[in-house]
Image: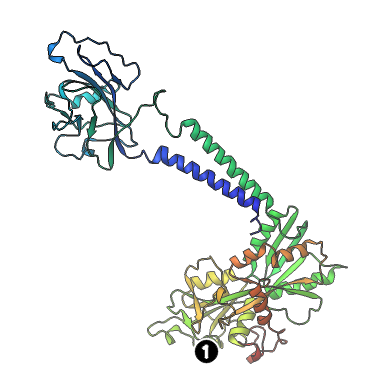
Amino acid sequence: MDWLTAENVIAVVTALVGVLVSVAAVWVQWWVPRRRRIGYRVQLDTSIAAGAAASTAVTGPGATVRRGFFDTTQELTDATIVLLRIENDGGLAIGGDDYTDGGGTGLTVRFGDPDGTGPGRRMKAIVVTAPEHPGLLTHFDAAWQPTVGAGSIRLPKVPLNRGAHYKLLVLLTGGPTGAPVTVDGTLDDGVVHVNHSTTPDDKTPLFSRVARTVTLTLTLCVIALAVIIVRDRTPPPIGCAEGRLTVIGSTAFAPVVRDLAKNYEKDCPGATVTVEARGSTSGIRRLAEEGARTAKGSPALVALSDGRKPDGFPELRESMVAVSLYTLVLNDEVPVHDLTLDRIRRIYRGEITNWGQLVPGLDLPVLLVSRDANSGTREVFQRRVLGRNEPANSSLDCRTSNDPESPVVRCELDSTEQVLSTVARLPGAIGYTEVREGTGLTGLHRVAVDGRRPVLDELGSSSYPYREVEYAYTWREPRPDSLTAAFLTYLRWGGGQDVVRGHGHLPCSTPKGLRICGEDAPPAPAPPAPSSGGRTGGTAVPRSGML
């Protein structure tokens, strides 16, 4: 939340206002009209008789009337003439089936009050014109016969494309000019309404084309300004430094470090961080070897370890990074989602060799897919879950045993990725991995321990045993201005915390993490002890290390 400053808040709010204005403009100008609409308006309403009132009602441009034009016609002493425009001013075409009044009537035009309770005019003659769409006139055929003398006209169901229109020139008698002229009808998901022309002497639309263009342009400018302000004010990782750094060790924590390295390089030009994960123990040994060869100072090397380093490396300096959760994983062919701690230990002692011993009717041999002796994940599993070493390696292909004396099939692999792919591929296989948040497990599933599952938010309250503190080691103390020191600060305290948590780990530098990392950090493990039968299956750990 480092970007949350007053300037940035103002910029973002301004951008949101601009976006909302643009959305409102588009809504009014595009979305609202996108329904079926028929608009109508009276373009001319005037008297044509000699004795009629001199006033006229003209709504269209250039509409002039010469009085006395029909003076010689005695039957038209109270005649008026109306020019009515009917058009599709919506966003959708209108077909004949879209008129829902029933029968053959599409629309009804009324002139005043035809019921006789108020002023009303009667039709004398009518002419239909459609200068831009002459094909519309075919719908006003011989079958259409409006009633002379009626106060209304029933129009047929005329299909209208968007923008199409036709006009009615109607000769009326029986009333003055200016009496209401209305058009009624019902449309499927549409309306019939009075509209207006867009001539200069009429009201312009709410948003013109220029206004829309200006609004959208200003919105884009405001958004660009907000992005620039936010990006410019986002601080780089704490203590950017140039140079080259190599991070080695834990394969379980490698996905986190790869993302951290990518972000650090992006924000700190001139820095190159390479991740070479080969296992916790392997990383510790390499760091010690390269540090011993360094004449003075500290090599540009950081070793990550699942748990504290073994004894015998006094020159290494440790930093607690995060609490990591681990989980057992099981091939999907085995319908087991929870194992007691006792059954897990019996499986790894070779007392349960077929899943049918736990699931009646299932005949699948137990295949133990493990990590090699350099793995911190394996060391944590032995100490936190088994309380002893795993059995010796007995298989090269993780499927068949190469040791007739071994009670169980067990293989060792070099990385967590290999463990996951092998367990997913082999029915009956079981293995272990760190909890990878946001990563789908295909072909395998997690297994709870005594009904408890690895849940990050439950750390500190749950007794889930398979967890460990992740440590970062350097050879002695790196120089404060070195890339090694800067990257460690970023990993533990800077923006790297969000990346660590995003991968399912709890940073030790958070208030909750400080407490749990201090409580969960075990003492240094005892020296290795030989396993039974002279075999070596890993680092022996005293019983006191078991949760």
Which residue lies under the disc numbered 1? Answer: 342
Check the image and report above or below for 353 versus 301: below
In the figure, is residue 406 to the left or right of 150? right
Q: In which quadrant of the rendered view does residue 356 lie? A: bottom left
Q: How is the image coloured?
A: rainbow
Check the image and report above or below for 56 versus 285: above
Name the image quarter holding the C terminus: bottom right
Quick one: 291 or 264, which is closer to the camera?
A: 264
Q: Is residue 373 visible?
A: no
- At mark 1, the secondary structure is helix
Name the image quarter holding the N terminus: bottom right
Q: Residue at x 73, y 60 (%)?
A: 238
In percent of width and height, residue 108 lies at: 19, 32
Q: Amino acid under label 1?
A: Asp
In percent of width and height, residue 398 lies at: 54, 76
In the figure, is residue 76 to the left or right of 385? left
Quick one: 367 or 519, which is closer to the camera?
A: 519
Give the total of numbered labels.
Answer: 1
Q: Residue at x 62, y 65 (%)?
A: 255
In percent of width and height, residue 63 lies at: 31, 16
Q: Residue at x 83, y 72 (%)?
A: 292
Q: Is residue 367 visible?
A: yes
In percent of width and height, residue 523 lies at: 71, 84
Quick one: 273 or 117, which is closer to the camera?
A: 117
Check the image and report above or below for 157 versus 416: above
Quick one: 138 or 335, which is closer to the camera?
A: 138
Q: Residues within 10 Å of mark 1 (few under 14, many from 20)?
A: few
The furthest residue to the top: 72
In the figure, is residue 243 to the left or right of 208? right
